[in-house]
């Protein structure tokens, strides 16, 4: 299930619960108000009947206890034992519950009174109940009333509730239909609004899919909306893409360096290895070669092995540099560093004159092994690209607050187009 559908269902469910609660509350209030008004009018009818001796011709002007004629349709009063009682559905009973009189409209049909109702009335409380009389639903009120002869009798008055029930049924239908339509409309509107809110996320998803397919980290998510949560997500995603693009370029550069490293290693190692292999073949000849030639071959082999060692050390140094491995810095005395480099340079290039200029008495911050390796690589480069007997100078000086170490030779130097940009 998608987030869009879940959000829409969530909003619709909240609205549905709200509408159901509102509809039930409204229906209950309206039902109580309707039946409460009917019950009040029935109580007034009985009260008017109880005071009939005071006003035999009808209620006095301004009597608010008289029955509501707009609510309770009145038929002409019928003569009942003990007096007259207005109303169409009216009945009297003795204190024991025996029917003693009723309006002609009942035509022998009795208004019911349950056992619980009879007990409640006999105890002096009024009693309301509903019943079906002549296929018409009635609300019946029963209570005790004192007659003219000081006889206590039970008076029952009823009001047909067909129309109020129809009104309430109509209200219930309107609430159900209206709530259903409102929920459907809210679902449709929520679906549209959720789609609008999630559209930047959909664009972000499509961009991520394109990047994953094309490996194009230069693409960015376009967001023209406010800087809300979705806008912050788009900005964060674009920042992440920028970091990925930078990392991807660094990875490509590292791979290019690795390819160049492999190519250079293959090229540099091929010549000494070929030479060593050829010399071994010469030494294995039968009959053996002359002693002088044998000595020359061994010397040449030794030189090539030394060259291989230097190449491997240089390649390892380059590999460590390309790997970006962090080196432990320390205070390195410049005098002892250059003395060690000069000593090893004389062993590395015995055909050259190694000139070591006295360095200043100070310490430099760096890694001693790495500094030594770099300087020996420069010495070896000068040894390879200069003629035997020439001088290779190793010097150091102080420029501002930095130490500078130079390895100078008399060779042709490096072509400008090969040098890296400064």
Image (cartoon, helix red, strand yellow):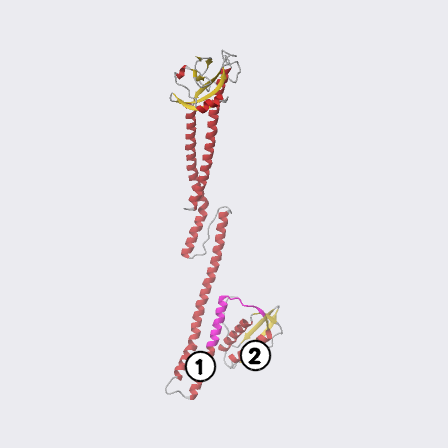
Q: Nearer the viewer, residue 295 or 149?
A: 149
Residue 71 within the magenta-colored segment of the rendering: no
Is 331 above or below relative to 387? above
Q: Quadrant of residue 170?
A: top left
View extreme (front): residue: 96
Q: Nearer the viewer, mark 2 or mark 1?
A: 1
Q: Nearer the viewer, residue 387 or 122?
A: 122
Q: Nearer the viewer, residue 151 or 383?
A: 151
Residue 415 shows in the view:
no
Is 225 above or below relative to 389? above
Residue 299 shows in the view:
yes
Percent x, y of residue 320: 49, 69
- Highlighted magenta segment, given as a residue range: 308-330
Main SS class of the magenta portion in the image: helix
Disc 2 designates what residue? 355
Q: Which residue sits at x=46%, y=81%?
A: 302
Disc 1 designates what residue? 301
Q: Which residue sits at x=50%, y=78%?
A: 383
Q: Would you call the spot at circle 1 few (<14 residues within 10 Å), some (14-19), or many (20 or more)?
A: many
Q: Nearer the viewer, residue 311 or 58?
A: 58
Q: Which residue sits at x=40%, y=84%?
A: 283
């Amino acid at each position: 299930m998608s987030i869009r559908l879940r959000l829409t269902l969530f909003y619709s469910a909240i609205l549905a619960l709200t509408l159901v609660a509102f509809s039930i509350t409204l229906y209950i209030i309206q039902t109580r108000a309707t039946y409460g008004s009917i019950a009040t009018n029935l109580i007034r009818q009985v009260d008017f009947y109880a005071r009939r001796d005071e006003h035999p011709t009808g209620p006095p002007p301004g009597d608010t206890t008289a029955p509501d004629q707009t609510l309770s349709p009145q038929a002409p009063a019928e003569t009942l034992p003990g007096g007259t009682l207005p109303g169409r559905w009216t009945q009297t009973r003795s204190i024991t519950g025996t029917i003693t009189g009723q309006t002609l409209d009942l035509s022998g049909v009795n208004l019911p009174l349950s056992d619980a109702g009879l007990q409640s009335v006999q105890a002096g409380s009024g009693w309301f109940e509903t019943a079906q009389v002549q296929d018409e639903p009635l609300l019946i009120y029963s209570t005790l009333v004192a007659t003219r002869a000081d006889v206590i009798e039970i008076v029952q008055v009823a009001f047909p509730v067909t129309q109020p029930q129809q009104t309430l049924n109509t209200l219930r239908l309107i609430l159900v239909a209206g709530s259903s339509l409102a929920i459907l409309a809210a679902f449709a509107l929520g679906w549209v609004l959720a789609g609008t809110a999630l559209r930047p996320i959909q664009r972000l998803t499509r961009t991520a899919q394109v990047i994953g397919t094309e490996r194009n980290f230069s693409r960015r998510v376009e967001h023209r909306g406010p800087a809300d949560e979705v806008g912050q997500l788009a900005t964060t995603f674009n920042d992440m893409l920028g970091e990925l693009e930078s990392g991807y370029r660094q990875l490509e550069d590292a791979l290019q360096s690795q390819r160049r490293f492999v190519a250079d290693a293959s090229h540099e190692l091929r010549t000494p290895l070929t030479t060593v292999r050829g010399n071994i073949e010469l030494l294995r000849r039968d009959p053996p070669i002359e002693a002088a030639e044998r000595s020359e071959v061994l010397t040449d082999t030794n030189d090539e092995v030394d060259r291989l060692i230097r190449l491997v050390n240089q390649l390892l140094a380059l590999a460590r540099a390309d790997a970006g491995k962090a080196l432990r810095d320390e205070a390195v005395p410049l005098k002892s560093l250059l003395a060690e480099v000069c000593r090893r340079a004389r062993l590395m290039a015995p055909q050259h004159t190694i000139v070591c200029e006295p360095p200043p008495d100070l310490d430099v911050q760096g890694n001693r092994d790495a500094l030594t390796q770099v300087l020996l690589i420069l010495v070896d480069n000068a040894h390879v690209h200069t003629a035997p007997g020439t001088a290779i100078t190793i010097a150091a000086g102080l420029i501002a607050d930095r130490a500078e170490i130079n390895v100078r030779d008399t060779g042709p130097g490096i072509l400008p187009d090969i040098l890296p940009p400064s």
